[in-house]
Amino acid sequence: MGESVTDKQLVERVQNGDKKAFDLLVLKYQQRIINLVSRFVYNPSDAQDIAQEAFIKAYRALPNFRGDSAFYTWMYRIAVNTAKNHLAVKSRRPLESAHDIDDVEQIEGDHTLRHQETPEHLLLRDEIQETIINSIEALPEDLKIAITLREVEGLSYEDIAVAMDCPIGTVRSRIFRARESIDKELKPLIEQ
């Protein structure tokens, strides 16, 4: 796909009946949507299924897409809602294991600890990673989604507000509360 073709142009083409234009949007955003869903659903197969379901929902809803937000932001909102629906259904079943401990390195981003290979630092790094995972998992869903969209996916506060369908002040509050909760859990480890 040439760089000259924008998302807006692709959306217009789909709305005018060009199904292949939607394939281009899927190719462009598929991996990012799978990565987003993987932050909520830890089984890779489930994450792919949910991402596919989100794209199907987007395709069906595309005739009503008004372009008030970027396609990417709109797609994120659909993916997050699809993942939330999956989690709601799944919460009625027994819980599966949480994040793979190696995934936290992407969330946490502490290069200093990763490169100090002493046994003490490795143990502390593992404890910090596990604490971050457990802290995020323990957050209420709205805080968990907000912090993940901000810190993992790198979305702006404005895009998160659109994705979560809430005011930007609410997004700021949720991210602040999530960070505060994570910091509270990390404080005993960091002060060692």
Image (cartoon, rainbow, N blue to C red):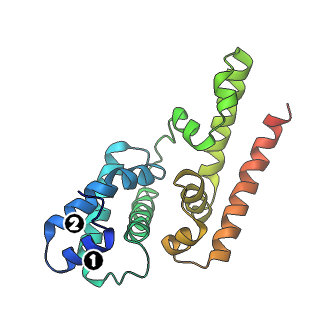
Badge nearest the viewer, 2 or 1: 2
Question: Count of labels shown?
Answer: 2
Vertical arrangement, residue 164 with respect to residue 122, above or below: below
Are circles 2 and 1 on residues that touch, CB within 8 Å? yes
Q: Distance between the residues labelled 2 and 1?
A: 10 Å
Image coordinates of residue 132 in percent, x first then y, are 65, 43
Residue type for callout 1: Leu
Q: Position of residue 154 (x, y in %)?
A: 55, 56
Q: Residue 22 carries which label?
A: 2
Identify which residue is drawn at 29% across, 84% down: 64
User: Outermost residue toward the right?
Assistant: 191
Query: Could you tell whether 2 is left or right of 125 in the image?
Result: left
Q: Mark 2 or mark 1, which has the lower sequence index?
A: 2
* Label 1 CA crowd tier, 10 Å (few <14, some 14–19, many 20+): some
In the figure, 167 relative to 144: above or below?
below
Q: What secondary structure is marked by label 2? A: helix
Residue 9 sits in which quadrant?
bottom left
The numbered mark at residue 136 is none
For the point 31% across and 68% down, which residue is it? Answer: 6
Seen in the picture, residue 42 relative to 14 is either above or below; the reply is above
- Label 1 element class: helix
> Which residue is disc 1 drawn over?
62
Amino acid type, mark 2: Phe
